[in-house]
Amino acid sequence: MNVTVEPGPLAGEVTAPSSKSEAHRLLICAAFAPGTTDIDCTTTSEDIDATARCLSALGARVTRTRRGFRVVPVRGTSATDNIPEAARGALLDCGESGSTLRFLLPVAAALGCDASLTGHGRLPERPLSPLYEELVAHGTELSPQGRMPLRVGGRLRAGRFSLPGNVSSQYVSGLLLAAPLLAAPVEVVVSEPVESLPYIDITVSALRRFGVGVDEGRVEGPDGPARSYVVSGSDGLVSPGTVSVGGDWSNAAFWLAAGALSDDGVAVRGLDVRSAQGDRQALAALALLGARVLRGAEGAACAHDGLAGRELDVSSCPDLVPPLAAVAAFAEGVTRITGAARLRLKESDRIATVSAAINSLGGRATALDDGLVIEGARELAGGTVDAANDHRIAMMAAVMAGRCAGPVTILGAECVNKSYPAFFEDLSSLGGNVRKES
């Protein structure tokens, strides 16, 4: 599907979709916590549904309800139990969700159920090292990397896992989510500095909501100072009965960016300014670029002011690059974004595709090894952007259309379904003139 968005600023109020990051983690905890768990999760997406589908394949009963999900857990999932019969030989289709793959790979290894994981799009190409090697060193048998389905045999042993801090935080989260299934102490040591640290915080928060304590500290790791995360093995998952998924700062950042490009501004309801989600840093980053920012008990808002280019280090929040780049393209002067090298391993090479999107609309962006240099302009011409099967590129282009002289056509815009299926409907509710073409 191609979508054309006509020029014109957005304004008004919209409700943030449910956090994809929180939903993945809470669904996994619920699937292995005795008792039924109701998860308040008002919206879903292809990535969230992929995790729900995989947990169902492992033997959990995950059903959609009016408020979100009801999860009846997998039976017999501690290290002292027999392998759950429903999980034996399970095929886990992760879709295009990197989180689903990297979280459930250690979980399947902990279950020892001889499962296979498969995926689509760029997912088979996305790296698994050094998580792959750590799993093998602790008793897991894995088929070669780079090909799917990825077969998981043997059974993961508890112990000490060491990871560098400059790799995906999803590796750390996957090991922590698997730890309660091993019924023995697990320590995950991550060398400093740790990229995308807030995502690990979301995982720790999810485990604590299900009764699992995680002791955090600093130790001397194999490569120097490191962070340590310890799950004792004595705490099993315990269902809280009902748990809620917060609003998604990652996707809300696009509406806040749209507000920064609009005199009347955009407000986003359903956001917790105290959330563990690292992408709440969108407000600080937009303020640094000169936008007028408001924080409240029920959400946040952003409006246009004197936008000016700045230096932005996004090492703790790389997913914010597309919405921040959309604003930087219209900020006076030059914006330099660094700390984003991991974006080359996303649904697209996101450094290259963000740069290409800006340039195709008449702007000036230069790709760096770990980021971008963007020369701002008052107005761009408009044009055609290839979303490259990347939901964040499609949303970025749609937001930029508000300040272009001509329409913006987004090729392959259906990729927003990965994280935000209602994106274009919400764009229309804010005054966006949207035309969809099959």
Image: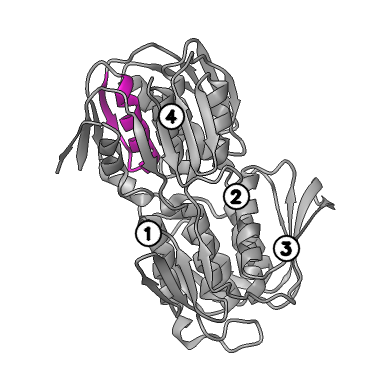
Q: Which numbered marker is on residue 199?
A: 2
Helix, strand or loop at disc 1? loop
Return the x and y of residue 327 as percentages of the image width and height.
44, 23
Q: Are marks 2 and 4 in contact (CB under 8 Å)?
A: no
Distance of mark 1 from mark 4, alpha carbons?
29 Å
On screen, residue 266 above or below 246: above
Amino acid at circle 4? Ala
Q: In this rendering, which labeled residue sits more in front, label 1 or label 4?
A: 4
Please tell me the numbered disc located at residue 214: 3
Residue at x-position 35% and y-position 56%: 46
Left or right of residue 52, residue 273 in this image: right
Quarter placement of the C terminus: top left
Residue 189's image quarter?
bottom right
Spot the residue most to the right.
220
Q: Nearer the viewer, residue 76 or 208?
A: 208
Q: Which numbered disc covers residue 257?
A: 4
Look at 58% across and 72% down and name the residue there: 240
**Apparent side of residue 155 relative to residue 186 in the rendered image (left or right):** left
Whether residue 348 is situated above or below residue 41 in the rendered picture: above
Mark toward the start of the polypeptide (2 vs 1) = 1
Of badges 2 and 4, the one in the foreground is: 4
Q: Amino acid at mark 1?
A: Gly
**Mark 1: few/some/many CA within 10 Å (<14, 14-19, 20+):** many
| Residue 17 seen anywhere in this rendered image of the structure | yes
